[in-house]
Each structure stands twice: as C-alpha cells, then as structure tokens.
Image (cartoon, coloured by chain):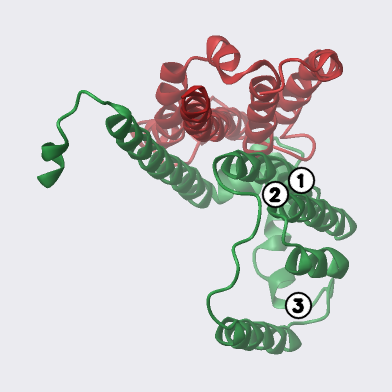
Chain colours: A red, B green
C-alpha cells in the first residue's frame, strides 16, 4: 500500500516493538493493573496490522500466516472453555478455577491467566483474520483496476 | 464530542467521516478515564479509535469515498432516533445519582467483590477478577460472540472473493450461471 514512504517505514520499525511489548505488558500485567486479554489482543493485532499496512499484507502474512490465524481463532475459545471443563473434571463447578492449584486463591489466579490467554488468542487472531480478508479483497480490486488500466 | 458528531453529519467525504469517528472514540475514551473506568477506556481507544478506523479505511479502499446522494427524505429515521434518544434520557432520570453509596448497584454484589476478590483470587485488580473469574460465563460468552462474528465476516468475505474470481475467470462457461 505505502511501501515507498521511508518515514513511515522507519517510524513503524521503531514503534512496532514498543506496541508489542505494551500489548504483552497489558496481557500479563492485567491482574495487577488495568487491561487484560481483550485490550492486549487488540493492541497486538494492531501492531501486525500496522506492519501489514506499511510493508504490504504479504509481508504480514509471512510473519503470521493465514492458516495460523485460522487455527488461533477457535483455539482461544477452546482454551477458555477447556479450562472450564478442567475445573468440572477436578470436581468443581464449570469455570471455577480453584482446584487447578493446591491453594484455591492460587488456582483462581492461574485460571484467570489461562483464560485471559484464551481471550487474547481469539481476539487478536479474529482482528487479523478480518484484516487479511479485507486486504485480500482490496488487493484483488487493485489487481483488477491495474488490468483494466493496461487494457 | 457534539462538534465531532455535527461534523460527521455535515461531512460528505467519507474519509473525513471515518477520521471524525476516530476522534469521537478518543474523546469517549477520555470520558471513561474521567469516570475512573480505565479498562473500558483502553478498550474504547484500541477497538473504537484504532481497529474500527483501520477496518473502515480498508472498506473505503474498496468503495467510493464520496457519500451517495439521498434517495428519500430522512424524516422517519430522524423521528426514530429522537424517540429512542428521548426514551433513553427519560430512563436515566430514574437512575440514582452517580457515585452514591446507597445506590442498588453499589449494595448488591459489589461490596462482596471489593472485600473478597483479592484473597479469593490473589489478583489485586478487581476488574480482572470479576471479568475472568466471578463473571467467567459472561466473558466466555463475549469471546464466543467475537469468534462467531469473526467466522461470519470471514465467510462473507471469502464468498465475495470467490465470486469475483469466478467472474474474472474467462475460461468459465457463462451458461453455468443458469444453475
């Protein structure tokens, strides 16, 4: 899309690690400060989308292939629901994480971390999948326009 | 925020509308910070201002950037909007004052969460504890909604892509379309 602009490329390269670090900070610090899986997932997806907008969607798909994204979308929901089933099998209510560790509080804490990871995976990959989808359509439109221009 | 809304209504360039929508979301995020809802504010800034703007720009890339002229008078939608808005404002009149300790929402389960969340879940952020643990079903539902919505959008986009490829394919017999 905007591959020729050197300022955008340099600034994006500087920003990308910061955005990713911030996303993971929000993810893993979510139980101490504001944030959690939703916000972190959107921020991480935003980093990849910024990369895709500036360096082209094929470059972004080289970093995270479409198949990986398509596996990650249901994987997050499965992690969330599976944690609930795990609690069920360990003799507690569905989505009660207490039996995951010896101490119920620690178990809840661990459960929250796992569940937030599930949320992160689904949110980030859904955003990416939609972006790839629209990007694919846009690339097709560009190709069609280019062909018409040549004719 | 009122200025941006008026700008969105007046502007006919859709690019400007998308950008003003992003500005509106950022203003909304600041309102959330003022109301001490930092989690909601982060979500609004990331999803409302960031992600929807990017997706809308991607859509703009596919369509025209000028608003189409109106084909009918906008009075019925205006009436519906005014009616809904009026009903919502009427509903807020019955709400207790903001931040009142005796209000029902501060009397029900909120004190239990504030007292017990930290030692029951070992998570100092009550918002996260409520979201992921006490209200786990709700969050699971939300994730499922995102999952379902994502799958739906992907199917729509994929079918559009396929149709375009079939149309672009010159080898295909046009009589097949009769099926």
Q: Which mark is residue B103?
A: 3
Image disc number at residue B48? 2
Indicate which disc, 3 or 1, sits on the residue closer to the N terminus: 1
Report which quarter residue B11 is drawn in: bottom right
- Tell me the residue that label 1 is attached to: B45
Indicate the secondary structure of the residue bearing disc 3.
loop
The local secondary structure at tag 2 comes to: helix
Any mark on residue B124, and which? none
Quadrant where the C terminus of chain B sits is top left
* SS class, disc 1: helix
Compare residues B127 and B3 and report the one nearer the observer: B3
Counting from the top left corner in percent of width and height, residue B48 is at: 70, 49
Residues under labels 1 and 2: Cα distance? 6 Å
Query: At 72% from the left edge and 26% from the top edge, which residue is drawn?
Result: A23
Q: Nearer the viewer, residue A73 or A142?
A: A142
Chain label for disc 3:
B
Distance CA(mark 2)–CA(mark 3): 30 Å
């Amino acid at each position: 899309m905007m591959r020729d602009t050197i300022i955008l490329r340099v600034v994006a390269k500087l920003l990308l690690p910061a955005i990713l670090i911030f996303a993971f900070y929000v993810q893993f610090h979510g139980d101490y400060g504001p944030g959690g899986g939703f916000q972190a997932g959107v921020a991480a997806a935003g980093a990849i989308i910024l990369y895709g907008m500036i360096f082209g969607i094929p470059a972004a798909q080289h970093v995270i292939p479409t198949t990986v994204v398509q596996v990650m979308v249901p994987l997050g929901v499965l992690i969330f629901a599976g944690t609930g089933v795990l609690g069920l099998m360990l003799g507690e209510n569905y989505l009660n994480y207490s039996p995951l560790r010896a101490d119920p509080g620690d178990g809840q804490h661990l459960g929250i971390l796992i569940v937030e990871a599930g949320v992160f995976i689904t949110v980030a990959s859904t955003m990416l999948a939609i972006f790839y989808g629209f990007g694919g359509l846009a690339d097709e439109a560009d190709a069609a326009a280019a062909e018409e221009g040549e004719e | 925020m009122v200025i941006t809304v008026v700008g969105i209504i007046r502007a006919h360039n859709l690019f400007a509308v998308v950008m003003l929508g992003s500005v509106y979301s950022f203003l909304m995020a600041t309102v959330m910070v003022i109301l001490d809802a930092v989690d909601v504010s982060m979500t609004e800034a990331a999803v409302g201002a960031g992600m929807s703007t990017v997706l809308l720009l991607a859509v703009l890339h596919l369509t025209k950037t000028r608003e189409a002229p109106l084909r009918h008078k906008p009075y019925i939608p205006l009436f519906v909007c005014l009616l809904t808005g009026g009903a919502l404002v009427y509903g807020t009149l019955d709400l207790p004052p903001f931040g009142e300790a005796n209000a029902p929402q501060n009397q029900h389960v909120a004190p239990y969460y504030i007292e017990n969340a930290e030692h029951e879940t070992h998570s100092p952020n009550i918002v996260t504890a409520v979201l992921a643990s006490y209200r786990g079903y709700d969050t699971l539902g939300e994730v499922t909604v995102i999952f379902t919505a994502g799958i739906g959008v992907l199917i729509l986009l994929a079918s559009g892509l396929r149709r375009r490829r079939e149309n672009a394919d010159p080898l295909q017999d046009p009589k097949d379309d009769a099926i």
